Amino acid sequence: MEKRIERIKEALHEARYKLTPQREVTVRVLLENESSHLSAEDVFMKVKDKYPEIGLATVYRTLELLNELNVLDKVNFGDGVSRYDLRKEGAQHFHHHLICIHCGSVEEIEEDLLTDVEKIVTRDFEFDIIDHRLTFHGVCKLCKGKEGNTDA
Amino acid sequence: MEKRIERIKEALHEARYKLTPQREVTVRVLLENESSHLSAEDVFMKVKDKYPEIGLATVYRTLELLNELNVLDKVNFGDGVSRYDLRKEGAQHFHHHLICIHCGSVEEIEEDLLTDVEKIVTRDFEFDIIDHRLTFHGVCKLCKGKEGNTDA
DNA sequence: ATTACTGCAAACTATTTGCAGCCTC
DNA sequence: GAGGCTGCAAATAGTTTGCAGTAAT
């Protein structure tokens, strides 16, 4: 945990930014809720518990900053809200998501499944891939069990 | 063109909705601008040329309706705007997109590249896939040529 | 007449921005 | 004391909703 904060601090310094108390608290909340896909409002409320004076705008500004530094990714699952997802250490690619249309759960897939697909895209479309976003919509393991029936 | 309007009309009727003049004009605009990834505002302006009395809310309502009927998909490319993309006839899956970070162009890929990936996800995560969204971010063919240099 | 549908305006939500004050060097 | 950073409040942007009127059966 502390090690990751240090790394993020370095990333900020490299870009001439400071790790202010507000930013540190925000980063801690993100680390403590990794893979929760928090919205800005979610982050704001959790940050407020630890640092009540903070303003929502500061949280937005911090999230935007961390996004620019590639510390986190801004994701959009279709509801009108942006969610923020820390990049794993050393991850070059955005991880994938499985979204359950019944319970709304979001599962993460760390493995890079797209190596072959990217080769095809690079070759056939002459497109240099920098990053990707892959989301599957469907029914998760738990909901499949609960529902029993295969389909409506 | 007329054939596709007929099909959409049928889809509406099956769900007990009518193809009103406003809805028809909206659908025509979508058909004429297929693969343009129009926003609601874009659609609204183009519809207004043909049907000046229409209101923005009607366009939104029509787009939402067509989305529910799976006639079109609502896409989000990261800017705060929803864009609307007609499904190709008989397409079971959402098509993929290549977004150029230089010129902002969006290229579509119709081929389903994910068959193998989906098999893995279904097996390893016990997740029943209904649909997917795949977007690549990178540099398109044209911009690669223009820039000349391989990287910054 | 009933019911779906429309246009307008107001409401709402998420996010951004302007600005005065604050902190740190 | 200069500049980055913050908190607040106001502004903006995209989208949704309430409602009275319209259209079609």
Image (cartoon, coloured by chain):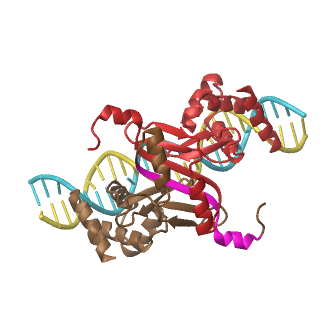
Chain colours: A red, B brown, C cyan, D yellow
Q: Is A101 displayed left or right of B6 in the figure? A: right
Residue A78 seen in the current view: no
Q: Is residue B28 above or below residue A62?
A: below
Q: Quadrant of residue B136?
A: bottom right
Q: Which residues are drawn in magenta?
A: B130-148
Image quadrant where residue A29 sits: top right
User: Residue A20, image x and y in percent?
Assistant: 76, 32
Q: Above or below — where is A142 with respect to B131? A: above
- List x then y, in percent, for residue B64: 36, 55
Residue at 29%, 66% in the rendered image = B8
Q: Looking at the figure, which quarter contains the C terminus of chain B?
A: bottom right
Question: In this orientation, which residue lies closer to the viewer: A112 or B139?
Answer: A112
Q: Residue at x 44, y 56 (%)?
A: B74
Q: Is residue A21 magenta?
A: no
Give whichever of A21, A5 is nearer the camera.
Answer: A5
Could you tell me which residue is drawn at 34 percent across and 71 percent down?
B25
Residue A99, given in percent of the width and then of the height, sits at 45, 42
Q: Nearer the viewer, residue B113 or D19?
A: B113
B146 falls in the magenta region: yes
> In terms of image quadrants, where is residue A122?
bottom right
- If the image is split into quadrants, where does the N terminus of chain B sit? bottom left
Residue B16 shows up from this direction? yes
Where is residue B75? Give x, y as percent.
47, 56
Q: Please state the total of marks drawn on the protein image.
A: 0
**Nearer to us in this view, B149 or D6:** B149
